[in-house]
Amino acid sequence: MRRRCAPLALALCTLTPAAAQAHVTHPVQPGETLSGIAAVHGVSADEVASASGLPPGAGIIAGSELTVPESGTAAPAPGGATGALGATGTEGPGPLGAYTVQPGDTLSALAARTGTTVEAVAAMNGLDPAAALVSGTALKMPTGSQLGGGEPEPATAVVQSAGPEPVAGSVDAGQIADVAGQHGVPADLAAAIAWQESGFNNGVVSSANARGVMQVLPGTWDWVQANLAERPLDTGSAVDNVHAGVLYLNRMLDMSGGDPATAAAGYYQGMASVQRIGMLPETQRYVANVLALRERFTGVASGDAGTGGGG
């Protein structure tokens, strides 16, 4: 699972991207990137992400629409924060184990470099272990993997076809509360993680191949479907993405004895890793962000409209 946005300093009704300044709508075309679109409009990628309710560095999907501030008009997000500012005023942590496939990479070589198996990497990322890797593909590698070698990022981001599909769309806090209630998960915790991960945006793909509102990895989606879900989940549904994430979060709560902080850490880092080595510094920052956001979602209930449940 994965991951990011962060606590904002105003009440929940201000959690939607600011729209007072001039902006244009940009339909995403195949092959376009967040940074490329920003450059065309003379603004930064972070400004486009913030205005569109996306985490910085998020993958974008052809056919979705971005809100792009006109050059010189971009304003900070509510409370003076950017879309990824955390409780301490620093950017929220990026996804653990994120890697972008470079020309010449193979699954076997990457698995060997990270001490895992081809089958494990393929399963986690929804890949055919016998197929060639496509340059530009986002992969989730084991937590703590150090694979960066200074190579330039491929020009085109590739999202492999696997569930959950990052179909454009969004949910609100009331819908998340409804799903959380069905599975016995605190609504404010589920909403806080959903906002931290994606800003409630189902079209988000992280640099570690996590997808949708709850940033569910393909391997996690398959595991939840096989072990926790009581019905087939729709790979293209934003609400079912929430179901998958909430079911997984419920398992993290069970494994942590009901402790929200440890459950959030397990959601981000992986519970086995947390139990083995404790919370990494990035995880500690992620948990702090989630707990701060949770306060903003206190009182959210099924049927509440918009992105918040009260301030």
Image (cartoon, rainbow, N blue to C red):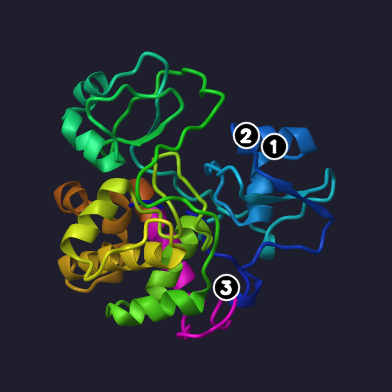
Q: Do the numbered discs 2 and 1 sit on residues whose CB atoms are within 8 Å?
A: yes
* Residue receiving disc 2: 32
How far apart are the alpha carbons under marks 2 and 3?
28 Å
Residue 59: in sight, yes or no? yes
Residue type pointed to by label 1: Ile
- Mark found first going from the N terminus, 2 or 1: 2
Residue 280: in sight, yes or no? no
**Would residue 64 appear left or right of 98 to someone viewing this image?**
right
Q: Is residue 290 above or below residue 23?
A: below
Q: Is residue 158 above or below residue 187?
A: above
**Would residue 167 appear left or right of 248 to someone viewing this image?**
right
Q: Secondary structure at mark 1?
A: helix
Q: How many marks?
A: 3
Q: Quadrant of residue 76?
A: bottom right
The circle drawn on residue 37 is 1
Horizontal and vertical percent position of residue 290 = 42, 64
Closer to viewer: mark 2 or mark 3:
2
- Mark found first going from the N terminus, 2 or 3: 2
Depth check, front residue: 205 or 28:
28
Horizontal and vertical percent position of residue 112 = 19, 22
- Please give the range of residues in magenta: 285-311
